[in-house]
Image (cartoon, rainbow, N blue to C red):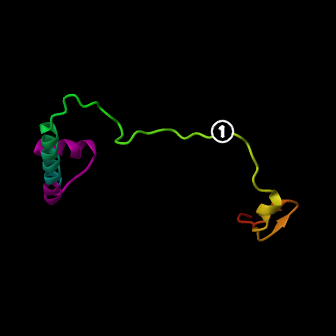
């Protein structure tokens, strides 16, 4: 485990304290235990899957539309002139 942590420190350009190394070692040990548990399960005859639930694309027709008019959108503008929003100048 120490070799793994040393390699990870080097690859990720980290410098872990002894306490941080102990926490990381505990995490990796728990993960290793989980993998051992998963490996003990008999999966012969089980088809591999990517998602638990089947996914289906819901597509709509690609139709261009303009649901709002310029005037409707400019009703919420603080100021508008000649069909354009007026905003305060930010850069002079």
Can you say which quadrant of the picture contains the N terminus? top left
Q: Which residues lie in the magenta part?
A: 1-23
Residue lying farthest right? 82
Residue lying at 76% horizontally and 68% vertically, measured from the top left: 77
Residue 19 is covered by the magenta coloring: yes
Secondary structure mostly seen in magenta is helix
Question: Residue 79 placed where, x, y %?
Answer: 80, 69
Residue density around tag 1, few if under 14, some if 14–19, many if 20 or more, within 10 Å? few
From the viewer's side, name the closer residue of 92 and 76.
Answer: 76
From the viewer's side, name the closer residue of 67 and 35.
Answer: 67
Residue lying at 13% horizontally and 53% vertically, measured from the top left: 26
* Secondary element at image label 1: loop
Please determine whether, in this image, residue 87 is positioned above or below residue 17.
below
Residue lying at 66% horizontally and 38% vertically, measured from the top left: 61
From the viewer's side, name the closer residue of 87 and 77.
Answer: 77
Question: Residue 59 placed where, x, y %?
Answer: 58, 39
Q: Is residue 18 left or right of residue 75?
A: left
Residue lying farthest bottom? 78
Residue lying farthest top? 45
Name the image quarter holding residue 23: bottom left
How many numbered badges does the structure rendering display?
1
Residue lying at 74% horizontally and 64% vertically, measured from the top left: 92
Name the image quarter holding residue 35: top left
Residue 78 is covered by the magenta coloring: no
Q: Which residue is mark 1?
A: 61
Question: Residue 30 placed where, x, y %?
Answer: 14, 50
Question: Residue 43 placed where, x, y %?
Answer: 19, 33
From the viewer's side, name the closer residue of 15 and 69.
Answer: 69
């Amino acid at each position: 485990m120490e070799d793994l942590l040393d390699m990870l420190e080097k690859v990720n350009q980290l410098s872990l304290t002894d306490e941080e190394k102990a926490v990381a070692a505990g995490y990796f040990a728990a993960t290793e235990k989980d993998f051992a548990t998963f490996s003990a399960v008999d999966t012969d005859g089980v088809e591999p899957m990517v998602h638990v639930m089947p996914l289906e694309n819901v597509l709509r027709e690609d139709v261009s539309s303009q649901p709002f008019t310029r005037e409707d959108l400019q009703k919420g503008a603080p100021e508008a002139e000649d069909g354009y929003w007026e905003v305060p100048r930010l850069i002079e």
